[in-house]
Amino acid sequence: MLRWLIAVVLVGLWLSSPIACRLYVPPEGSGPEPTTSGESSTGESATESSSGSEPVADSGTNTTTDIVPDNGGIEVPTSATALLEYLKKGSYLSWRRESAPHQTQGPHKSGSLVFINDILLASLEANNTSHPKGSIAIKELYEPDLQTKAGWAVMVKTEDASLSGKGWYWFEVFSSARGDQFIADGNGVALCTGCHQPGKDYFLTKFPLQ
Ligand code: HEC
């Protein structure tokens, strides 16, 4: 036992000595190093180095689902937190919109500026009674001064059918609220569909946009 221990210690000392490193490392290092050749002759050290980086790559992938998740071809996310991120980035600002913020009778703060995406635009132009999946209306909400942005109300058609308002995803948030305090976040939210039901497939704003 003692002899075995001494042997282990001696081998350990030898391995950690500079001479051993110089002698020992080159053949080991030459395996994974020429990554350009693409061939790893030393399978063991290759897996060692790749397994070392795997957990990092995994956790990275898990946390990068945020901004534009694949949403079945729909242009915006239809879950509250991701949609709020999208709205803050302002990617919809190039869409067709009303000319300027204006007073609104709805419950949507005091002022409003409506944006519609190309799918909804085409459907409204075609005078359709039902809008196809992927249609989106984004309403910027404004304070009474009509300059200070106060939040967003959004409707996204997630089905071709209207399904009594359940074919639309409804979302609303006020800027003054905490980031996770959403007034609406889901399909067929009764608070929204009640008022929007008389619209053209739930769309109320005058078209062509004013
Ligand atoms: C009390 C009635 C009422 C309720 C409740 C209501 N809205 Fe509206 N909404 C309106 C009116 C009226 C308009 C038309 C523009 C305007 O005058 O503000 C509108 C416009 C919109 C628009 C622009 C597209 C369109 O249909 O004209 C969106 C998006 C919207 N509302 C989302 C919502 C969401 C989301 C909810 C639920 C949280 C909701 N609305 C609840 C009355 C209402």
Image (cartoon, helix red, strand yellow):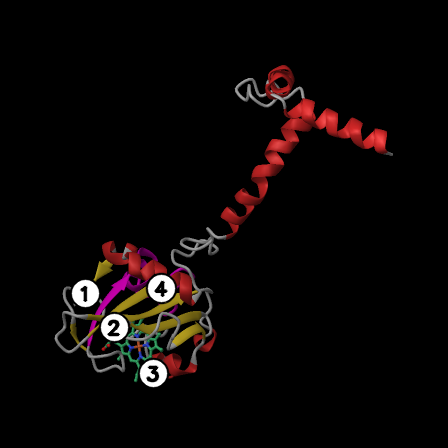
Amino acid under label 4? Leu
Q: Residues within 10 Å of mark 2 (few under 14, many from 20)?
A: some
**CA separation in Å, label 2 and label 1:** 10 Å
Ligand 1, image quadrant it occupies: bottom left
Q: Please give the range of residues in magenta.
A: 111-136
Q: Nearer the viewer, residue 102 or 38?
A: 38
Mark 1 lies on residue:
98
- Among the 4 quarters of the image, the one containing residue 208: bottom left
> Callout 4: helix, strand or loop?
helix
Mark 3 lies on residue:
195
Expressed as whole percent of the image width and height from the top left, the position of residue 88 reads: 30, 60
Circle nearer the N terminus (2, 1): 1
**CA separation in Å, label 4 and label 2:** 22 Å
Find out if the beta carbon at label 3 lies less than 8 Å from the nearest ligand 1 atom.
yes
> Callout 3: helix, strand or loop?
helix
Q: Is residue 177 left or right of residue 66?
A: left
Mark 2 lies on residue:
205
Mark 4 lies on residue:
84
Circle nearer the N terminus (2, 3): 3
Q: Residues within 10 Å of mark 3 (few under 14, many from 20)?
A: few
Q: Residues within 10 Å of mark 1 (few under 14, many from 20)?
A: some
**CA separation in Å, label 3 and label 4:** 23 Å
Q: Is residue 70 left or right of residue 18?
A: left
Q: Are marks 2 and 1 in contact (CB under 8 Å)?
A: yes
Mark 4 vs mark 2: give the one in front: 4
Seen in the picture, residue 73 relative to 162 is either above or below; the reply is: above
Circle nearer the N terminus (1, 3): 1
**CA separation in Å, label 4 and label 1:** 21 Å
Q: Quadrant of the N terminus?
A: top right
Q: Nearer the viewer, residue 121 or 113?
A: 113
Q: Is residue 134 magenta?
A: yes
